[in-house]
Amino acid sequence: MVDTVSLDTAKEVIDAAERRANEIDNPMVVTVANSEGNLVAQHRMDGAWLASVDISRNKAYTAAALDMPTHDLEEPTKPGESLYGLQNTNQGRMVIFGGGYPLERDGDIVGAIGVSGGAVEQDMDVAEAGVDKFDDLSS
């Protein structure tokens, strides 16, 4: 059986991401999914965009489904590149810009985090705070 991220761990990851979002004064939606991209936990900060609920969940789904950060999809999905049109697959759930990261334990993907609510760089920054917390908990 594949190890997965627990609800308690997801809450701690979300708390760390929320602290970072507060530091940069940008309300966000933070989602943690399991290794199959299914929802474990999601938190919408006060004032975060409603659209970010789906976007953050889809970023987590994409990171889990493809075992890679979503920002790594920017180049290969440009017109003429090998993954052009990827964002139109999986019922439109694939996100091809930053803010989604896989969560790894002992070399295995056990979950993913997706963050939405700011500029892509802000989403990535806040998500990275969650990944750092996950890594701390897993070591």
Image: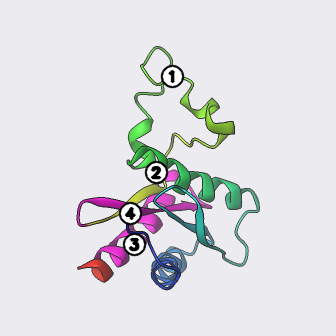
Residue 132 in percent (x, y) is at 33, 73
Is residue 132 in the magenta section? yes
Instruction: Please give the residue where the numbered disc 3 appears in the rendered image.
Output: 129
Q: Distance between the residues labelled 3 and 2?
A: 16 Å
Residue at x-position 48% and y-position 27%: 77
Mark 4 is on which residue type?
A: Val
The numbered mark at residue 63 is 2
The numbered mark at residue 2 is 4
Q: How far apart are marks 1 and 4 (CA)?
A: 31 Å
Mark 3 is on which residue type?
A: Ala
Of the numbered discs 3 and 2, the one sitting upstream in the chain is 2
Residue 94 in percent (x, y) is at 57, 41
Q: Quadrant of the C terminus?
A: bottom left
Of the numbered discs 2 and 1, the one sitting upstream in the chain is 2
Q: Can residue 98 be seen in this view?
A: no
Which of the 4 quarters of the picture holds residue 42?
bottom right
